[in-house]
Amino acid sequence: MKRLYTRQGKELVPFSPFSLVKTLSLFIFFCFLLFSSGCTDLDDSNYEEGFIEISKNVSDSGSEMELIEVANLSQVDEALKKGPVVLKIGSKGCIPCGKQEEIFSELLPMYQDSASFMLIDIKQHPEFAKEFGVRSIPDTCIIADIESEKYIYMRQDGSKSQERTSARFLGVTDKETLSETLKKAIESRKAEG
């Protein structure tokens, strides 16, 4: 059997297939992280079309509920008087963010009278990225309530937390997961009130 050798510097060393497998595995792992974590491209100049039209008025009390674009946190505070807030932080140029908005649109009719669906575009309002600790988008959370001027977030398991990091959904979150978590937030509000 003939052994394969590779050159390291000036000497020949036996070729190890393990080093190739290790390098390939690391490459695949990093590709997986890059493509599964959501949108990291913050240049939205090429993706202006195809996104949902957004209402900018939180006080619109018409019978048809719309996605509300947040410009300041007082809008979120006002919406919390009605019920929980499902908040997506993203960008109009982010394709996964657009998919998350489509899921929001499917949920809107189901929760029209009991919750609000709000969006923050971190391109237009970068201060919110720091405020909410956003590192990748879309980043979604359900704000169940507000106590002592701090948001109370609903975790997927039905528990509440003031720590958003333990209650957020990274990447595109399916309709069923958001719906179940939102139901828990609505039930907790009814139990308290």
Image: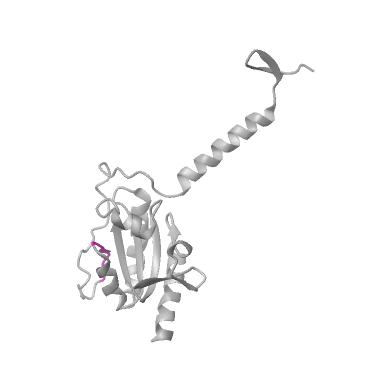
Give the residue furthest to the top: 10
Asked if residue 70 lies left or right of residue 136, the reply is left
Left or right of 113 on screen, residue 36: right
- Compared with 31, 70 (above or below) is below
**Was residue 32 drawn as part of the magenta stretch in this picture?**
no
Residue 17 in the image, given as x and y percentages of width and height: 68, 28
Total marks in image: 0
State the residue lying farthest toward the right.
Answer: 1
What's drawn in magenta, residue-wise? 65-71
Q: Residue at x 31, y 58 (%)?
A: 128
Image quadrant in which the N terminus is located: top right
Q: Is residue 192 above or below residue 91?
A: below
Q: Is residue 67 magenta?
A: yes
Q: Quadrant of residue 188?
A: bottom left
Which residue appears at 30% of the width and 42% of the height? 43
Q: Main secondary structure of the magenta part?
A: loop
- x and y percentages locating residue 164 in the rendered image: 43, 64
Q: Is residue 115 visible?
A: yes
Give the answer, above or below, for where 129 lies relative to 6.
below
Q: Position of residue 82 (x, y in %)?
A: 30, 78
Q: Compare residues 104 and 12 and report the one nearer the observer.
A: 12
Position of 58 compared to 37: left or right?
left
Residue at image position (41%, 85%) is: 192
- Give the residue displayed 43% in from the left and 85% down from the top: 191
Q: Position of residue 148 (x, y in %)?
A: 36, 76
- Determine whether 4 is above or below 99 in the image: above
Quarter holding the C terminus is: bottom left
**Which colouring convention does the figure follow?**
one colour
Q: Is residue 102 visible?
A: no
